[in-house]
Image (cartoon, rainbow, N blue to C red):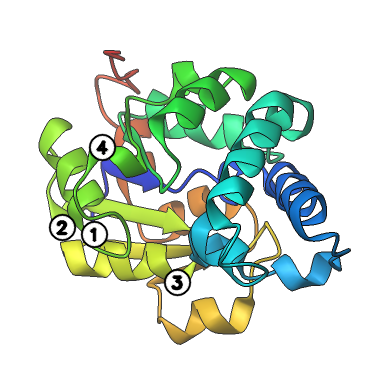
Amino acid sequence: MRFNCFIFDFDGTLAHSEPAYREAFLHSIRLHTGLEIKEDEFRDFWNVTPQEVLSRYSCEMLEEMLVSFEEHYYANHHHYLTPYDGIAGLLKSLSDRGGKIAVVSLKPRRAGEREMDFTGLRSLVDLSVWGDDVGRPKPQPDGVLRAMAELSGDPDSTLVIGDSPADIMMGRAAGTRTAAALWSGSNRERLLEERPDFVLEKPAALLTALTEIGDVVLQNLTSTEGPRRSSHTR
């Protein structure tokens, strides 16, 4: 195997954004229903849309709840959002060794582009495909297929990395290899049920896995031309 294209999910994989979403959900539900919800009720919200989450508490006030959710999220997400430890180093290492880096996320472009700046990851990513950029978001393969097309990648040399079953399903549907990112505390059992090709406990484990299979990391390190930095077009 030789990987040269790495496609990452954003929330829960590159960025620790759970608190921002959780606080926005709690605010909206409390404002419109008066309910005080326990935080553990939101453990599975990564795999569903805000509409689906909020409709659990009120279908009648769903539109108003969505407005309040978005207002709170966009007003406060910069207070909560941080990249996971080791992510910046991982992306830089992959890029320095010739890897192409993409993000494919359910997040709308309006939020995603701002959050790339908040986390300081923009300069480390070649391409971003957001939820409203494609007709069929994950778990459908459209986002991965678009990223591969724009980065001149192909399924045999592409690895999709994410923290939800939808990420693994998306990569498999696009014909790529997949890796489960477990550093966010995602439901391990649900992820492993999708049978990812790699299981990563922390970001640096990806470099270890690539080294063990003699992948692009070693290939570029031992090249007579030496490691190259990919050009970033944004």
User: Which of the marked residues, 1 or 3, is nearer the chain's N terminus?
Assistant: 1
The residue pinned by badge 2 equals 156
**Helix, strand or loop under label 2:** helix
* CB within 8 Å, label 4 to label 3: no
* CB within 8 Å, label 2 to label 1: yes
The dot on residue 1 is: 1
The residue pinned by badge 3 equals 165
> Which amino acid, mark 1?
Met
In the image, what residue occupies the spot 47% across and 31% down?
Answer: 112
Q: Residue 78 placed where, x, y %?
A: 71, 25
Disc 2: CA contacts within 10 A as few (<14), some (14-19) or many (>=20)? some
**Helix, strand or loop under label 1:** loop
> Which amino acid, mark 4?
Asp
On screen, 231 above or below 199?
above
In the image, what residue occupies the spot 15% across and 56% down?
Answer: 155
Gap in angstroms between the C-alphas marked 2 and 1: 8 Å
Quarter of the picture holding the C terminus: top left
The residue pinned by badge 4 equals 133
* CB within 8 Å, label 1 to label 3: no
User: Which of the marked residues, 4 or 3, is nearer the chain's N terminus?
Assistant: 4
Gap in angstroms between the C-alphas marked 1 and 3: 23 Å
Give the number of the mark in front: 4 or 1.
4
> Which amino acid, mark 3?
Pro
**Helix, strand or loop under label 3:** helix
Disc 1: CA contacts within 10 A as few (<14), some (14-19) or many (>=20)? few
